[in-house]
Amino acid sequence: MNNKLYSILLTSLLGLSALISALFFLGAVSEGILIALCYALFGIASITAIAFPIIFMAQNPKGAKNALFGVIALLLIFGIAYALSSNEEFFTINGVQLANATASKYSEAGLIAFYIIGSGAILAVIYAEVSKLFK
């Protein structure tokens, strides 16, 4: 496919979305049609978000290797976060359970992974700015 075909496809999807949205606000179509359009657009976006990176990696194996390193680094960070998290159950004062052991472990692992990635981003920004001073 060439860029002109992509442009035509995107413009037609945008026009269809705008038309159905306008008809919805005028009361000519029900929310069911609008929701069905949203599902269809979400499906198209999901398929393209999965398919195009796979096609690009097949065409550019060196870039795929670099992407694989990033995925491995993320899996390593999430593994470390999961290992550091506890599976403590939480209750309210009345004894109502807020989070079971599994939910607690996953949510704490997500928070720890966020802290690790956030700290890495802050350190990367600081390093970039400090390295500019010495150039």
Image (cartoon, rainbow, N blue to C red):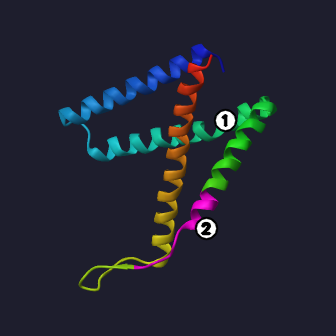
Give the quarter of the image for residue 68.
top right
SS class of the residue under badge 1?
A: helix
Mark whose residue sits in front, 2 or 1 = 2
According to the image, label 1 marks what residue? 53
Left or right: residue 19 versus residue 87 is left
* Marks 2 and 1, the one that precedes in the sequence: 1
Q: Write the residue at 40% across / 41% down.
A: 38
Residue 94: percent from left, percent from top: 24, 85
Q: Write the residue at 53% across / 55% down.
A: 113
Q: Write the residue at 81% across / 33% down.
A: 61
Observer-nearest of 18 and 135: 135
Q: Residue type at mark 2: give it.
A: Ala
Query: What is the total number of numbered labels drawn onto the structure image?
Result: 2
Residue 103: percent from left, percent from top: 46, 71
Split into 4 quadrants, where in the image is the C terminus?
A: top right
Whole-angstrom CA distance, mark 2 to mark 1, is 30 Å
According to the image, label 2 marks what residue? 83
Q: Residue type at mark 1: give it.
A: Pro
Left or right: residue 31 versus residue 90 is left
Residue 119: percent from left, percent from top: 51, 45
Q: Residue furthest front?
A: 134
Could you say which disc has been placed on residue 26 in the image?
Answer: none
Split into 4 quadrants, where in the image is the N terminus?
A: top right
Q: Write the residue at 46% across / 78% down.
A: 88
Q: Which residues are magenta?
A: 78-89
